[in-house]
Amino acid sequence: MNENKLREQICLLATSIFDRGLTHGSTGNISVRLDDNNILVTPSGSSFGRLDPNQIVKVSKSGEITGSTTPTKELPLHQAFYETRGMKSGAVVHLHSTYSVALSMMPGINEDNVLPSYTPYSVMLLGKVKLLPFFVPGDPAMGDSIKGLAGKRSAVLLANHGPVVSGKDLESAVNAVEELEATAKLALILRGSDAIELKTSQIDKIVSKFNIEWD
């Protein structure tokens, strides 16, 4: 897909996310890797519901910025996924989705795998989701924390902040972050109910059949 089409796709999917209340106001950011390893990223302070393809910022691998706007302050988060996951990462989506943020604040959750394994699709689309600690928005240390995972996770949940998901392309990343939000909603609805999760043997079959990263 050429650059102009990718700019349009970013705006189209961002609008869909916004219209369904998965992020709000000027929260959230999206990036896509181009064939030359430059990236397109949403501008700082922009709303997913009102993005203009011409305002999407291009950032070179060396950090040179092309465009009339400033890239999101969460750019280091995106760059860290591209750096550590290589060609497995073609797009990154970060949201402030309500149920995911709420789950990140719950006591007693498994920090290494924050989502309960209720459905095969959360396993298939996300693998294990790591809970990372709270960082002040825009802190480059967020990117360092992603790098510390050495490319082993495609999705993380930032405490008191929201999910960040990497995918092979933009549509895959959007589908995965929506699956994360839906599973977080399930986790909160079912909290304290002794709901039955998938068994380890069932998860192993899913991981094997679909070649899922499950580390």
Image (cartoon, rainbow, N blue to C red):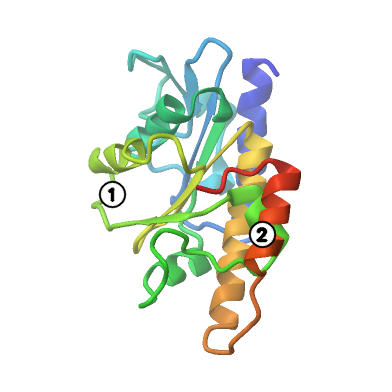
Residue 108 image position (x, y, % from top left) = 37, 77
Q: Residue at x 71, y 60 (%)?
A: 120
In this rendering, would 41 be left or right of 194? Answer: left
Looking at the rendering, which quadrant does residue 198 occupy?
bottom right
Looking at the rendering, which quadrant does residue 133 occupy?
bottom left
Q: Amino acid at mark 2?
A: Ile
Residue 126 image position (x, y, % from top left) = 59, 50
Q: Amino acid at mark 1?
A: Pro
> With respect to residue 68, does 173 lie above or below?
below
Relative depth, front residue between 180 and 118: 118
| Residue located beneath label 1 in the image | 137
| Residue located beneath label 2 in the image | 203
Mark 2 or 1: in front is 2
Q: Which label's residue is closer to the chain start, 2 or 1?
A: 1
Say which element carries label 2: helix
Residue 25 image position (x, y, % from top left) = 46, 56
In this rendering, would 184 be left or right of 162? Answer: right
Q: Residue furthest top?
A: 36
How crowded pointer 1 is (Cα within 10 Å; few <14, some 14-19, many 20+) is rated as few
Q: Residue at x 57, y 29 (%)?
A: 88
> With respect to residue 8, does 149 lie above or below?
below
| C-alpha gap between disc 2 and disc 1 | 34 Å
Say which element carries label 1: loop
Q: Residue at x 41, y 14 (%)?
A: 60
Q: Residue at x 49, y 54 (%)?
A: 129
Residue 79 image position (x, y, % from top left) = 39, 29
Q: Is residue 19 visible?
A: no
Relative depth, front residue between 73 and 154: 154
How crowded pointer 2 is (Cα within 10 Å; few <14, some 14-19, many 20+) is rated as some
